[in-house]
Amino acid sequence: MKKNILIVAVAIVAIVCGIAAYFYWLHSPAKTEQQAQVPPVVAVPPAPTLEKVIEAPPEPPVLPKLSESDKTVRDILSGLLNNESLLKLFHPERIIRNIVATIDNLPRKRVSANIIPVKRPPGPFLTAGTEEEKTISPKNAARYAAYVKIAEVIPAQKLVEIYVRFYPLFQQAYEELGYPKKYFNDRLLAVLDHLLAAPEPKEPVKLDQPGVFYLYADAELEARSAGQKILMRIGAQNELKIKAKLREIKQQVLLNMRDRKTGDAK
């Protein structure tokens, strides 16, 4: 398993660690006064397919251009973390674009090291056992302590407030990936659910090393996505902590959402 994608699970927390969500007013037609006065229809038609969108704030915020947003994002992260050493875990450039690209790729088999918004954990991947039967060392989990700390120190409610405020930049970055008619918020919720479904294997987790990289000895675990394999690799307690934060984040996002008919303008 590639060392340089181990921290991707924490990148999901980084999403919310700073930034994005959905401004419905950017993508849907405004109600006219005439429309607002139409009385409710008594007959209830078949329920349309619904997507979830973030409820818009009353006043749209003034945001920097996506290409000029790195300083603003760094300042926000600095205020949220209140810890210079934690802030240094983030790459200083292309933060929003890299967060969006990383989230989009977590359910896939691989995540490119070039797009991960946080730096790799210190030290080598630690194993235990014999050459014939290697396992992930219990000491390996300590390598991720700083990344788990990020998840623990930032309140989910505050993260999602910032997420909502800066969402248009995340949506723009998502569209630039080749999704001009899709919502980043939909993708975010799908990826959160995907990560929460990651197995929680009993420790110690057995490994194979057919070449340079380690693989999970259990073929079912090895067949999982990059994001789920990372969660399984950071240690059982760390996985539970990250999942707890992801659940909090999802709950806060859902609290800010309302239904939108599929036919509404995007």
Image: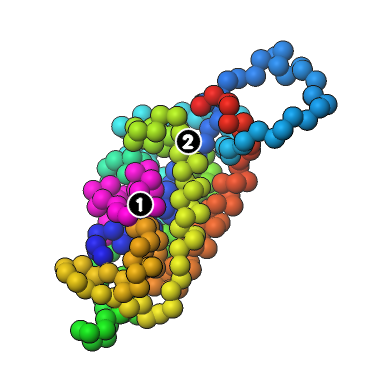
Residue 146 falls in which quadrant of the image?
bottom left
116 to 212, vertically: above or below: above
Does residue 113 show up? yes
130 to 164, vertically: above or below: below
Residue at x-position 34% and y-position 36%: 177
Mark 2: which secondary structure?
loop
Q: Nearer the viewer, residue 22 or 18?
A: 22
- The majority secondary structure of the magenta stretch comes to loop
Specify start and end residues of the magenta stretch as a single range.
99-120
Q: Nearer the viewer, residue 15 or 213?
A: 213
Residue 242 shown in magenta: no
Q: Give the alpha-carbon distance from disc 1 to disc 2, as whole Å.
A: 18 Å
- The residue beneath circle 2 is 183
- The residue beneath circle 1 is 108
Residue 91 horizontal side relative to residue 205, left or right? left
Does residue 152 show up? no
Residue at x-position 83% and y-position 26%: 42
> At which x and y percent is residue 58?
61, 29
Mark 1: which secondary structure?
loop
The amino acid type, in three-letter code, at marker 2 is Tyr
> At which x and y percent is residue 34?
72, 13
Residue 207 falls in which quadrant of the image?
bottom left
26 to 102, vertically: above or below: above
Residue at x-position 37% and y-position 58%: 225
Q: Nearer the viewer, mark 1 or mark 2?
A: 1
